[in-house]
Image (tube, grey):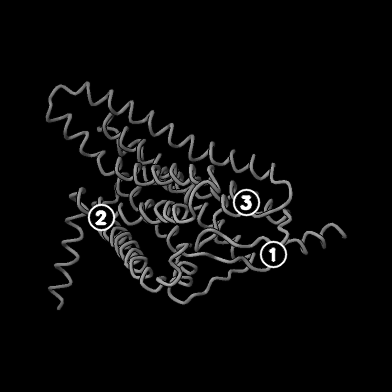
Amino acid sequence: MRNSSSTLESLPTMFILVGIPGLEAEHIWISIPFCLMYTIIFLGNGTILHVIRTDTALHQPMYLFLAMLALVEVGVSASTLPTVLGVFLFGITEISFNACLLQMFCIHSFSIMESAVLLSMSVDRFVAIYNPLRYTAILTVPRIFGMAASIGLKSIVFMAPLTILLRHLTFCGHNILSHSYCLHPNLIHLPCGDTTINNIYGLFIVTSTFGLDSLLIVVSYGFILHTVLSIATGKGRRKALSTCSSHVCAVFSYYVPMIGLSMVHRLGYHVSPLLHAMMANAYLFLPPVVNPIVYSIKTKEIRHGISWILSEKKARV
């Protein structure tokens, strides 16, 4: 009983969120690009989801995986929106301990899901190029929904222990965060107790999700290139590779900022707080902003679906 009460006493009641270090006076102006990014994220990904839902011709594996990606990106952005706009628009910098843990859980869970969806999409591209005649027979709708359920369950199972472990650490009054949202690599630097178990489990999550997913994506593209090179005509090769271009952009926009943010957190105090903030924002905002734009431009079927929706609205007016 004494241990549980001392644990509760060691937990901070509030964390202090930080916007862009050194630019606190300009936060109201900085809120404008953030509001614009959120508009693009929700409008762009929402449009893709609506097009895929309403057009039965798009109820195919490639577009169902794209819908999963759009849904996950909406989830990541919805997780950060309350505190980001709270800090930049209204100057609300405090967040309760439990709300911070919930936000951290949601952000990282959706990030794990996004990595797994990107891997699923690379497998989808391999199957489509390697065995196009059996493409829909291999990736059936029930199988895709099963994959989606397993991705969601895996993310929750992986993140739940990390949240519980944080509740058992001693914080000793350290409660100032480096961002306008709660991330585990930032939170784990605040406790004054032993964080070895947390660090080991955090490393396990990173290697078994992001690390393994990225490795398998590279392997998938190795098989894709091998298959493409076996195609006799140059036109056939270009057509096969063109179907992967949007996914390659999605992979780079996701993993490059993530690697950059990981390096910044490893370097810790040797890196300026401004770079910390910029890399974290790039990691969370770049993929959901870029992906709907890229897929809308590069994917003919999505482009036609958006044009059809706009023409229908004009006809009603």
Question: Is 87 rendered above or below residue 275?
Answer: below
Which residue is under mark 3? 189
Residue 51 percent location from the top left of the image: 26, 59
In the rendered view, does 196 fall on the left or right side of 277? right
**Which residue does the numbered mark 1 point to in the structure image?**
12
Residue in the picture at 42% in, 61% down: 77
How dense is the environment of label 2, judged by Cα within 10 Å: few (below 14), some, or many (20 and up)? some
Find the distance from the CA under tag 3 to the CA under tag 2.
36 Å
Could you tell me how far apart the alpha carbons at marks 3 and 1 are, in whole angstroms? 14 Å
The residue labelled by disc 2 is 293
Q: Identify the disc placed on residue 250.
A: none
Q: Position of residue 143 (x, y in %)?
A: 42, 42
Closer to the camera: disc 3 or disc 1? 3
- Return the disc, 3 or 2, that comes first in the chain's sequence: 3
The percent position of residue 242, horizontal first and vertical second, equals: 20, 38
Q: Is residue 72 visible?
A: no
